[in-house]
Amino acid sequence: MFESLEQALAVLRDPREDSLKRVDAVHYLADLGTEEAIQAMLDALEDDDYGVRWAVADELAKMGKRGATIMARKMLDPNASSRVFEMALHVFKDNGDLLVRSKAANLVKALESDHTIAAMTEAGNLLKELMD
């Protein structure tokens, strides 16, 4: 469907585009996996369209450890919104890597309890574990 990174970025960043087309752009960017593509996906975690945000979280969950590391770093961004934390629950609870899901148990509990500070603390702890 997409022929280039630029084309996918343009569709993803245009809220007037059809929602399903924007979700397809997320999948294309995840398949590319470049730094620029991942950054665009992270930016889309703030999107007004829930389906777009979910697609990003789903792709990060499929990435296993890499996706968990990316999301944990995003959670530690002081400008991260509640939308990021909402999608983080899916990334960690349904992560494609069983070891990540196990290590993220405390983070999932904090996210389910909607304790932002605790979730940020647990995200930092998980990030340290994943980097070892």
Image: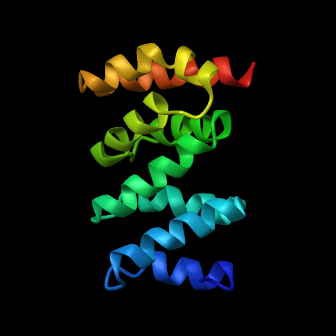
- Quarter holding the N terminus is bottom right
103 to 47, vertically: above or below: above
The x and y percentages for residue 55 are 44, 57
Res 61 visible = yes
Q: Give the residue drawn at x 70%, y 58%.
A: 33
Picture layout, residue 95 above or below residue 54? above
Number of callouts:
0
**Extreme residue toward the right, this view:** 132
Q: Residue at x 47, y 33 (%)?
A: 94
Q: Is residue 25 above or below residue 110?
A: below
The percent position of residue 116, horizontal first and vertical second, equals 30, 28
Residue at screen point 40% across, 82% down: 14
Does the rendering let one see residue 118?
A: no
Q: Is residue 74 above or below residue 56?
A: above
Q: Quadrant of residue 31?
A: bottom right
The answer to which quarter of the image holds residue 85 is: top left
Q: How is the image coloured?
A: rainbow
Q: x, y (%) of residue 100? A: 59, 23
Residue 73 in the image: x percent, y percent?
A: 55, 38
Q: Residue at x 29, y 65 (%)?
A: 49
Left or right: 72 as drawn, with respect to 18: right
The quarter of the rendered structure image containing the C terminus is top right
